Amino acid sequence: MIIKFHGVRGSTPSPGPATIRYGGNTSCVHILLGNGKHIVLDAGTGLRLLGHELARIDDPVYLLLSHGHWDHIQGYPYFAPIYQPEREINVFTSGPSGQRLLCSLFDQMDGSHFPVKADELPSRGECIFENTESILKSHNISITRKALNHPGSGTAYLIDDDGIRCAYITDNELEPPYRVHTTYDEWVEFCSGVDVLIHDAQYTEDDMPHKHGWGHSLISQVRQLAIDAEVGSLVMYHHDPDRSDGELDEIARENEIHFSGRRAPARSWCAREGMVIQLSRRVAGGDTVFEIR
Ligand SMILES: [Zn+2]
Ligand SMILES: [Zn+2]
């Protein structure tokens, strides 16, 4: 499994001198499975540069959306493969808001917000919002879903690549003040022992209580989840647009101190645009080997 981060920012793009190292593009992660399948998690503005890479090959693309907020859909009109004739692009979402979510992805291409209309695209796009897991299984992609605690709802994904597992949980408030879709204990179970946990870590204690209920987690809560779920590695993701490179460096340093001497997680990072995590098994059933670029 090769995981590459193309957009790591939450809420809105945040280019500028203060974010140049971690990057200002919004949510987008590419996962290449061992069987050659290309999974794209979310279609934030990071999707544009990934599109240049995927336009050079002709494999099908499996785009899994967490939800329909701007920072998860705005890269789609600039995704080069959608302009390739007959290119197979399968868009997946799920849950009761699935249809509405797909509307947000395609309605932004209505000729008013964007010059090209979605129904004029030459690619072969299929939108699936029911039976996501079984349909992906028929394409040799194994995923499990979980409902996010987020205004308007959304979906987390657990991807299992022949025993190497990555959980993608963004725009999730671990302990929200509103009705909980997934409890903390259920999150611990969902990502128990995964090799990589990618989790929304948008807020610090200074952001509270003002932003309690906005659908994102505290960095301290995410650290605790990584410990309780005994994950192999933690990637903090969906950084606040106002979080500077220097502040993210400091959070990464605090992570090292917080996790030192603990069994899990063995590694942690603040996600950075262009960061690559390559995971492989030394032998079947053996330890996972990590390579970071
Ligand atoms: Zn978001
Ligand atoms: Zn959101």
Image: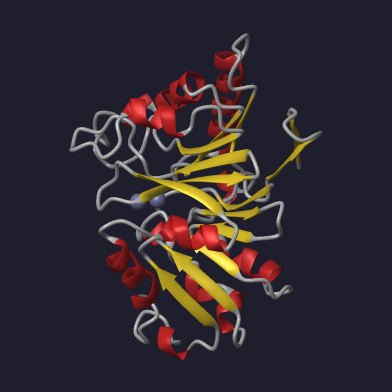
Q: Is residue 291 above or below residue 254?
A: below
Q: Quadrant of the C terminus?
A: top right
Along the horizontal axis of the image, is 225 left or right of 49?
left
Q: In the orientation shown, which residue stands out farthest toward the left?
A: 178
Q: At which x and y percent is residue 198?
A: 53, 39
Q: At which x and y percent is residue 177?
A: 20, 32
Residue 277 found in image quarter: top right
Q: Is residue 44 visible?
A: no
Along the horizontal axis of the image, is 113 left or right of 97?
right
Q: At which x and y percent is residue 87?
A: 60, 80
Residue 52 found in image quarter: bottom right
Closer to the camera in the image, 191 or 248? 191
Q: At which x and y percent is residue 135?
A: 47, 63
Q: Is residue 19 visible?
A: yes
Q: In the orientation shown, which residue stands out farthest toward the right?
A: 282
Along the horizontal axis of the image, is 47 left or right of 129?
right
Q: In the orientation shown, which residue stands out farthest toward the top?
A: 261
Q: Residue at x 36, y 40 (%)?
A: 172
Indicate the colouring scheme.
secondary structure
Along the horizontal axis of the image, is 65 left or right of 264?
left
Closer to the camera in the image, 154 or 126? 126
Q: Residue at x 60, y 76 (%)?
A: 80
Number of numbered markers: 0
Q: Residue at x 35, y 30 (%)?
A: 186
Q: Residue at x 38, y 29 (%)?
A: 218
